[in-house]
Image (cartoon, rainbow, N blue to C red):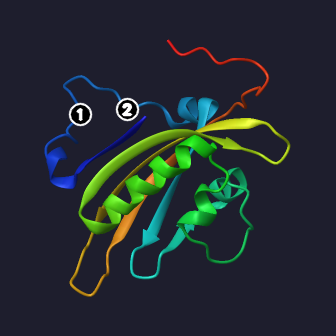
């Protein structure tokens, strides 16, 4: 899944439907880890938390860019993810994608990302902010997955 839209297309979307009950954070944490992230468009530097660094196989310290982040993604998805970020870096946009992280031990972990770019200026400034969602399981690369 790779989706992008103009950021202003989602105005009014944020209001929860009548009767919506916010999920209990403890229940959510049983199934997944959610962590926020941001990218500075002027420098190209991403700022992510410890869980995202761990899942992406990145060191605990130091700056990194988009190519460092996506190098662990399933190869066929990398190009599409790069295209989403490219569009988001050039105009206010909202996007989401899901892919698979391939770990050094050969195991695979799903990841879902959603983000929104904003704060553009004539001098190239701007930012992209979002969240990563890491389900708390790994996929066996030798068994086929079932998409329903």
- The answer to whether residue 48 is visible is no
Q: Is residue 13 left or right of residue 138?
A: left
Quadrant for the N terminus, please: top left
Residue 67 sits in which quadrant? Answer: bottom right
Q: Residue at x 63, y 30 (%)?
A: 30
Mark 2, residues whose alpha carbon is within 10 Å: few (<14), some, or many (≥20)? few
Taking the image as shown, residue 49 lies to the left or right of residue 114, namely right
Q: Which residue is mark 1?
A: 16
Count of picture labels: 2
Pointer 1 with pointer 2, Cβ within 8 A: yes
Label 1 crowding class (10 Å Cα cut-off): few <14, some 14-19, many 20+?
A: few
Residue 41 in the image, given as x and y percentages of width and height: 39, 75
The secondary element bearing badge 1 is classed as loop
- Furthest residue to the bottom? 123
Residue 102: x and y, percent? Answer: 72, 43
Q: Residue furthest right?
A: 105
What residue did someone put label 2 on? Answer: 22
Please tell me whether residue 28 is drawn above or below residue 73 in the rendered image. Answer: above
Which residue is nearer to you in this view: 104 or 34?
104
């Amino acid at each position: 899944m790779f989706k992008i839209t103009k950021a202003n297309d989602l105005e009014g979307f944020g209001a929860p439907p009548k009767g919506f009950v916010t999920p209990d954070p403890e229940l959510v944490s049983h199934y997944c880890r959610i962590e926020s992230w941001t990218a500075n468009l002027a420098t190209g530097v991403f700022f992510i938390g410890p869980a995202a660094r761990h899942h992406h196989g990145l060191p605990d310290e130091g700056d990194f860019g988009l190519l460092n982040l996506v190098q662990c993604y399933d190869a066929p998805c990398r190009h599409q993810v790069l295209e989403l970020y490219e569009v988001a870096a050039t105009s206010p946009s909202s996007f989401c994608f899901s892919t698979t992280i391939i770990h050094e031990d050969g195991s695979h972990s799903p990841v879902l990302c959603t983000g929104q770019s904003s704060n553009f200026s004539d001098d190239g400034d701007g930012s992209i902010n979002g969240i990563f969602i890491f389900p708390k399981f790994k996929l066996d690369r030798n068994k086929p997955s079932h998409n329903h």
